[in-house]
Image (spheres, rainbow, N blue to C red):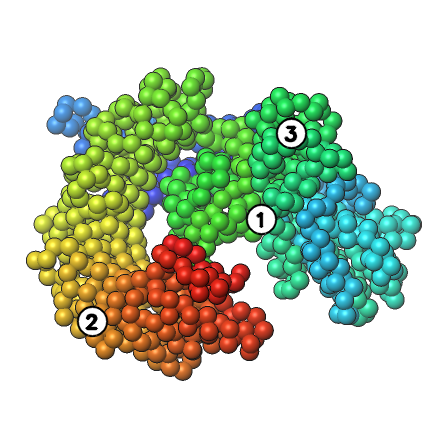
Amino acid sequence: MAAYAAIVSVIHIIDTIEHHHSPPICIDKQQLESLTRIVTSLQEFLEGYKSLVADGDEADPLEMRIVDAAHAVEDVIESHIVDVIKLGRSSPNPNEIFLQGYVVDAVHAAEEVNSGEEVSCIDFYEDLQQVIEEMNVIKKEAMEIAAEAQLQRKVSSTHAGSLTSSSNVKEGMMVGFDDVQLQLLDWLTGGNRNRQILPITGMGGIGKTTLARHIFEHALVKEHFDICAWTTISQTYNIRETLGQVLKQVTGNLGSDDLSENELGEKLYKYLCGRRYIFILDDMWSVEVWDKMRFFFPDYNDGSRVIVTTRLSNLAAELTDSNIIGMRFLDDVCSWNLFSKTVFGGDGFPLQLEEIGKKIVGKCKGLPLSIAVIGGLLAKSELTLEYWEHIEKNLSTIVNSKNDEYCLRVLKLSYDHLPAYLKPCFLYMGMFGEDEEIRVAELMRLWVSEGFLKPIINKSLETIANEYLKELVDRNLILVHELGAVGNIKHCKMHDLLRDVSFQEAEKQRFYYVLKQHCPRGINSHRRIFIPESTSNRTFKNALDTMSRARSFICHCYNVREKFQKFGFLRTLTTKFSSKYLEENVFQLVNLRYLSAEFREGFQIPSSISLLWNLHTLIVSCRGKPTTAPVEIWKMYKLKHVKFENKGMYLPDPRSGHSDVMMENLETLKGVLDFNLNEEVVKRIPNTKKLAIRYQDEVMDRVKCLSYLQCLSKLESLLCLIRYGSEEYPQSINFPRSLKKLYLGGVYFDLEEILEKIGSLPLLEKLQLFGGQFATRSWEIVEGQFPRLKYLELWECWDMECWTLEGSCLPRLEQLSLCVMNSFEEFPSEIGEIATLKLIKLFKCSESMVVSLKKIVEEQEELQGDPPFHVLVKLNNVSQELQSLATPNFRVVKW
């Protein structure tokens, strides 16, 4: 919700000013304490608040008042920061000018500066006091609402309904899940005599309830079980009433109103004893429901079963550690079959509508609910090409229309049931494009810069962001698109229909605004502006005055040619264009936290970058030649992620800047050219976790620089590209034992000695080697080396002819990739004995290597009965002999 995001954002501003080593302004202690109490109370209120508006186009008025009040506080504080920094002076200490919260000496409330201008602290403290008082009024109203709601919950708790019978289940046909149904029937009626819980998980509308209903009504189930009952659980439940309704469903008699929860449970327990039962608990949102009911469902080793459907994958894992059904999206064939049956039943599909019908089905992205809703609409409509084309163009609007109350309710239910701290993260996802592959690392940093992540003691904001992402994945609201080599989520996506829900809710709550051709009045109340690629400079120019209080610009267009000096409040700026207007003004936006921008060739970052007092992410791309950062960058205490893309950037020696600032927050430093690592540098960046450097200056003493790598004791990921080699490298380089990922490239020297050092790294999970030489033309890995390595990739190691694996080495290897290894001809047979290995990739390697690997695979198949791992071979030319080796698990394709 936008209100929660706004309140948490204020908390972040207060915290940042309080703990910054050199804050640009100070806030009066009493005002600070008062503001902190108010926003903390409102945060707790919103975490338990249920909107006064159940649905509709309008947002909850109370929430919007909280949003406006929080924004007013931010405006007062951040505008004062802009004034103070731009005029080049610090704000005076408020404790010197305040007595019991009142200004007593106006003379000291303003300071003269060289320009003749002044920063008025009187106005700042008076304005801040006014918005604090306004927010306090809202807080009092919120507390009254909270007290009334608590009383109402006590009164209505004994009357809360929580269960419906199976007759209320929405009808739906099942297509594409025959194999899952057979598997589930086997589990239900199999030989295991213990009472088992069988969860079915997946996003809303994917068919969990439909599958459960088909199981529930299956003749085999009716015959196998003595008692069959269906209950639908809501997020707000009453165990006593639930047990009473369950008892009525299985016995035909409602339990007495005089019976307590335990008495009803005991009555149910006695009735179920000696009978084999199956219960469907549909749409469960909390494991507490089962924890409170499980004791009333006897387990007499008679094969009784409980099926639970839930959107929460983590809840399923809490219920059982086996037999979890994860519902998948329908493939193209099954989607078409479901659509055809929904629209025409058993009749044939008209040929003139097939092409447009397949476009409609394609836009449903395999979600059964979407297919069923659109199919049901078309089944009742005119069968004309023009009408179907209209449906195809407006599909998302139709699916999310309030005219189909059931569909909207199903899709939006997952959002409504989110805890308050996850709702801003979900709403933010609507800003990304349809089918866009979202880089998780970028998404985490954007969430941090926006300021809506709830702080947790002893956890970094990015750790919190990562946990929130996993929660949304567990709730099936975000889809994992690509995993990294070591199992981390690298890219994610969002189903189009959930993205539509996110977009609609965000627009309703003024969470962000997408810039359109005609800007409506009131856009100045939006804090986040998304500028699509199609936006013209004229549109942007017309909207300038209405966007002056924006905190975020996510700009995908290339047409903007306006100056940015009006946007002094900006915290987040991502752009895909470069212009003199951007270069002239972007480093004057002193409140920036996240900057990702492209600049023209020859651009030099100005020394004024140090005015960006709260910048934590800097991503710079320069066309043409590399650029050079100013020495003032070493003064930027808050910098956490620095990435120089494209041609890279030179960093000056910090000693010439005479700065004593320790960049203790810096975790990522990428794209640095000829980085002069020395004692002074490593002392300033002690907590660096990711480092990517390139050495291309032949004169530079790289050996000495690389010897300092071992001093970076927190380093987890290192990319090091070296243009020129040296015989001293193996002796001089000592990697920190904290390394988890290592990419070593362009190193044309003997690799054998350096690989001994790499093999002893205890935490290394990913190793990529590009180039290098083997003096003995062989590589021997002995037992004990690479204890945690999961991913190994070798590129162009020209002279490696023999590879020896001794003992049980590489015990955790999952993926192996060999590219352009012309001298290497035969795999060691031990490679087939690595139990964890899942995939081997061969790119542009010799045919003899492919043949030897195929032999190993066949030998393991004879021993195990199944292929030991998958193989993908890509070659420039694929001979008939190699083609004959191909199988579904051993693919051979042309490069």
x and y percentages locating residue 616 in the rendered image? 31, 45
Disc 3 or 2, which lies upstream in sequence?
3
Which residue is tagged 1? 475
Q: Check residue 355 in the rendering and tell me which mark sits there, or answer none.
A: none
Look at the image and tell me whether residue 119 can be seen.
Answer: no
Amino acid type, mark 3: Leu
The quadrant in which residue 768 appears is bottom left
Apparent side of residue 643 relative to residue 184 in the rendered image (left or right) = left
Which residue is tagged 2? 750
Residue nearest the viewer, comparing 148 with 709: 709
Look at the image and tell me whether residue 341 can be seen.
Answer: yes
Which residue is tagged 3? 353
* Residue furthest left as drawn: 699
Q: Do tag 3 and tag 1 residues touch (Cβ < 8 Å)?
A: no
Image: 660 above or below 761: above
Q: What element carries label 2?
A: loop
- Residue at screen point 76% across, 35% down: 347
Q: Nearer the viewer, mark 2 or mark 1?
A: 2
x and y percentages locating residue 44 in the rendered image? 53, 42
Apparent side of residue 774 relative to residue 241 in the rendered image (left or right) = left
x and y percentages locating residue 243 in the rendered image? 81, 52
x and y percentages locating residue 242 in the rendered image? 79, 49
Q: What element carries label 3?
A: helix
